[in-house]
Image: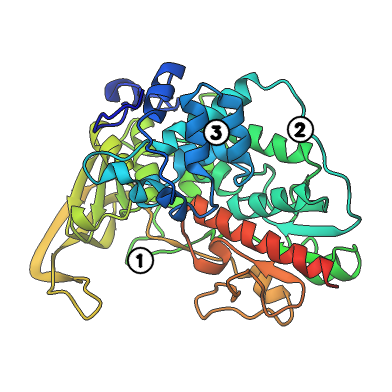
């Protein structure tokens, strides 16, 4: 029988006063009963509007129908046809602005909890699956993938399924890209990331870590000396941006990249970690995106009182609604229409406070967006001994500076067409290296498109 409830089955979570003191996963996942009940809310629409909102085109009604019948492994088989990282996407994708935003049930209530169901299916498979992945027969062709983040892993997975000999080159000592160094354990456990990567390895994907393309090896060498016939660049956008205000070089000021990498990749939050981290007693995080929420919530778990400063209003916050809600529940303070203009030092050269300009929104411009403008003479001081800058990132310039004939945007992004083809024959690119910082699922979609184009390129050589 269909479930016509107007609301989703709630996701079980750790209570805020418990979780803000640990790095264990916040959301605990559906039970089988909850998953089946939620799946029965799906109307199984013939025109599948939810699929149009999915960057990797998962057949959402089909997998949900299998969940409703209790056929969880069949549901997984449907998802995995389109997505190489379902357990990851079920956790970190902004479903509320993608697949769930198209759900008919959302017109007169809440949409079906597509992301939560995807997570349930993937987790159940990973916990119970006994059969080994069948490695496809080799087609005799070699492809290289630069970067083991979402776009690179999606591209590698799709190529491996078609029989390509795929090698992924990763600069860091652990694969996963932003999934490993950027997203905290309490949102995305690293064991989940490793499980998904192990699945790709079972398909035959080889991963070479500690390999900095542009230093250790060049794209030209990969193609001319090592026999790779096509290359995908999925190196992400890991170059941090700063505000260029006084005091950004003080002790206690971090880019969000460094702060989160120390915590996530180097496990600085663990008592036995050899990597230092100083979140202080009063931390200020500058920015309003998901990275800012991750940094703020991490600092809270390290014992700091945390304030997020954002130069626009709450209505303009780009972070996911769920992340904002969780941050508030965990005791993080938000100061809106507030823009840092100087970081002030104590007598030892450490952060003492952040001087901020109070802002107001102008009338909307031609694009329809109101700009924050300073209120003359209106300043506040926020006491702080740690400041994290989470105001965006750019692509690392290393690959473009070491690759002849690779066209890039002025801001550093690689120029690629809708299928990922760059100005270099046989070289494709996608994800944050092309678009700048975006979402995991959009990066995966770009990786999948490029894999399809690379396959056609190889077949027509």
Which secondary structure, mark 1? loop
Image quarter where the C terminus lies is: bottom right
Q: Nearer the viewer, mark 1 or mark 2?
A: 2
> Circle 1 is placed at which residue position?
243
Which secondary structure, mark 3? loop
Q: How many marks?
A: 3
Q: Position of residue 330 (x, y in %)?
A: 27, 31
Residue drawn at x 83%, y 66% as measured from the top left: 459
Q: Is residue 461 above or below residue 23?
A: below
Q: Position of residue 18 (x, y in %)?
A: 32, 20
> Circle 3 is placed at which residue position?
267
Residue drawn at x 59%, y 78% as measured from the top left: 408
Upstream in sequence: badge 1 or badge 2: 2
Q: Is residue 329 above or below residue 172?
A: above
Q: Which mark is residue 85?
A: none
Q: Position of residue 348 (x, y in %)?
A: 35, 49
Residue 185 visible, this orientation: no
Measured Cα–Cα span from mark 1 to mark 2:
47 Å
Is 338 situated left or right of 222 in this image? Answer: left
Which secondary structure, mark 2? loop
Measured Cα–Cα span from mark 3 to mark 1:
27 Å
> Depth check: 458 or 286 in front?
458
Upstream in sequence: badge 3 or badge 1: 1
Residue 102 visible, this orientation: yes
> Circle 2 is placed at which residue position?
133
Q: Nearer the viewer, mark 3 or mark 2?
A: 2
The crowd level at tag 1 (other Cα within 10 Å; few <14, some 14-19, many 20+) is few
Upstream in sequence: badge 3 or badge 2: 2
Measured Cα–Cα span from mark 3 to mark 2:
31 Å
Q: Position of residue 457 (x, y in %)?
A: 78, 70
> Depth check: 310 or 12 in front?
12
Residue drawn at x 90%, y 62% as measured from the top left: 226
């Amino acid at each position: 029988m269909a479930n016509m409830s107007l609301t989703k089955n709630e996701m079980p979570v750790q209570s805020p006063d418990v979780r803000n003191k640990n790095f264990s996963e916040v959301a605990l996942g559906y039970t089988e009963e909850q998953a089946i009940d939620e799946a029965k809310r799906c109307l199984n629409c013939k025109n599948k509007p939810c699929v149009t909102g999915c960057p990797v085109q998962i057949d959402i009604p089909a997998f949900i129908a299998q969940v409703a019948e209790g056929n969880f492994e069949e549901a997984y088989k449907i998802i995995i046809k389109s997505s190489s990282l379902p357990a990851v996407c079920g956790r970190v994708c902004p479903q509320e602005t993608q697949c769930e935003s198209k759900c008919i049930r959302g017109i007169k209530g809440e949409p079906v909890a597509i992301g939560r169901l995807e997570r349930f299916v993937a987790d159940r498979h990973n916990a119970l699956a006994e059969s080994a992945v069948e490695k496809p027969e080799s087609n005799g062709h070699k492809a290289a993938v630069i970067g083991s983040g979402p776009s690179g892993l999606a591209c590698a997975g799709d190529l491996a399924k078609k029989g390509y000999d795929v090698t992924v080159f990763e600069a860091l000592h652990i694969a996963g890209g932003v999934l490993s160094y950027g997203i905290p354990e309490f949102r995305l456990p690293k064991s989940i990331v490793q499980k998904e990567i192990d699945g790709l390895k079972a398909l035959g994907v080889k991963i070479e870590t500690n390999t900095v393309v542009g230093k250790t090896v060049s794209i030209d060498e990969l193609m001319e000396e090592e026999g790779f016939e096509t290359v995908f660049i999925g190196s992400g956008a890991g170059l941090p941006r700063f505000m260029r205000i006084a005091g950004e070089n003080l002790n206690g000021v971090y880019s969000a990249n460094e702060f989160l990498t120390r915590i996530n990749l180097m496990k600085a939050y663990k008592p036995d970690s050899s990597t230092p981290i100083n979140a202080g007693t009063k931390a200020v995080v500058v920015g309003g995106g998901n990275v800012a929420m991750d940094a703020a919530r991490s600092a809270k778990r390290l014992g700091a009182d945390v304030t997020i400063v954002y130069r626009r209003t709450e209505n303009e916050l780009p972070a996911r609604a769920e992340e904002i809600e969780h941050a508030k529940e965990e005791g993080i303070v938000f100061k809106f229409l507030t823009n840092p203009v100087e970081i002030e030092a104590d007598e030892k050269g450490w952060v003492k406070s952040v001087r901020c300009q109070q802002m107001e929104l102008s009338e909307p411009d031609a694009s329809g967006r109101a700009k924050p403008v300073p209120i003359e003479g209106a300043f506040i001081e926020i006491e702080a001994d740690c400041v994290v800058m989470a105001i965006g990132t750019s692509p690392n310039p290393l690959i473009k500076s070491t690759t002849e004939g690779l066209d890039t945007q002025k801001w550093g992004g690689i120029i690629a067409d809708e299928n990922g083809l760059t100005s270099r024959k046989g070289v494709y690119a996608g994800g944050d290296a092309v678009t700048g910082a975006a979402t995991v699922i959009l990066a995966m979609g770009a990786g999948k498109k490029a894999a399809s184009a690379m396959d056609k390129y190889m077949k027509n050589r």
